[in-house]
Image: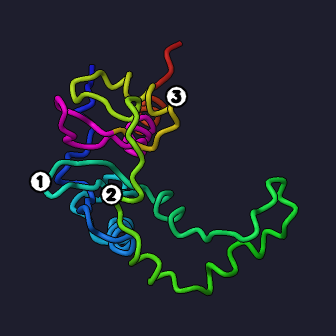
Amino acid sequence: MKIVRDMMVPLEEYTHLSVGDSLYDAILAVAQALTGPTTDPSRPRDRGALVQAPDGRVIGKVSMWDLMTALEPNYEPPIDPFGTLDDNILWSQWLTGDLAQKARSIKVEDLLQKTSKGETIDEKAPLDLAVHRLIRGKHLSLLVTRGDAIIGILRLSDVFKAVSERIKAARLQPTPA
């Protein structure tokens, strides 16, 4: 049976940021990970980044979702929760505002959420447990640990790729009569 370590992306191979980096830096790093050259073209692209403390410890992760949410404007007056306001005006100020300046003023550590126990998994855990946590928790990734240290990340995109390859291989096999 495969274990998490067999499918995780090691820390040194994943996009990372440092405490003190800005949202601007994070957006550029994730955009580069999505579109730039890659050492392994068969591997799904990174859709976020790990944030490291000055001592090299990973203290959290930020996703594209986190980065975009941080840029969302504050609406005044409060938005009607039933959606009766015209959706077209919600982002109009955001699109014309100075996004780069706002992005430079926000630090990545301010975007970090407390990592729940369900978002981490030991490197030696069975892969089926990891898949269960990804699906059940609706997580796009899990932080992989060795003791108290984060050593990598297990991404839903990698698990999906493995599942799709297994299904594709099974489809090519003749069906027993």
Instruction: Using the image, tell me which numbered label, if any, was put on residue 136.
Output: 3
Of the residues under marks 3 and 2, which one precedes in the sequence? 2
Q: Nearer the viewer, mark 1 or mark 2?
A: 1
Give percent across and percent down for residue 78. Answer: 75, 63
Of the residues under marks 3 and 1, which one precedes in the sequence? 1
Whether 152 is drawn above or below 133: the answer is below
Of the residues under marks 1 and 2, which one precedes in the sequence? 2
Give percent across and percent down for residue 116. Answer: 40, 34
Residue type pointed to by label 2? Ala
Query: Which residue is most to the right?
Result: 84
Question: In terms of secondary structure, where does tag 2 sit?
Answer: strand
Give the spatial CA distance, label 3 vs label 2.
22 Å
Whether 49 is drawn above or below 171: the answer is below
Is residue 172 one of those drawn in magenta? no
In this rendering, position of residue 115 left or right of residue 150:
right
Residue stretch in magenta: 143-164
Is residue 148 one of those drawn in magenta? yes
Question: In terms of secondary structure, where does tag 3 sit?
Answer: helix
Give the spatial CA distance, label 3 vs label 1.
33 Å
Query: Which residue is most to the left?
Result: 55
Give percent across and percent down for residue 152. Answer: 23, 43
Residue type pointed to by label 1? Asp
To which residue does mark 1 refer? 55
| The one of 144 and 172 positioned closer to us in this rendering | 144
Q: How does the figure colour the protein chain or chains? A: rainbow
To which residue does mark 2 refer? 49
Residue type pointed to by label 3? Arg
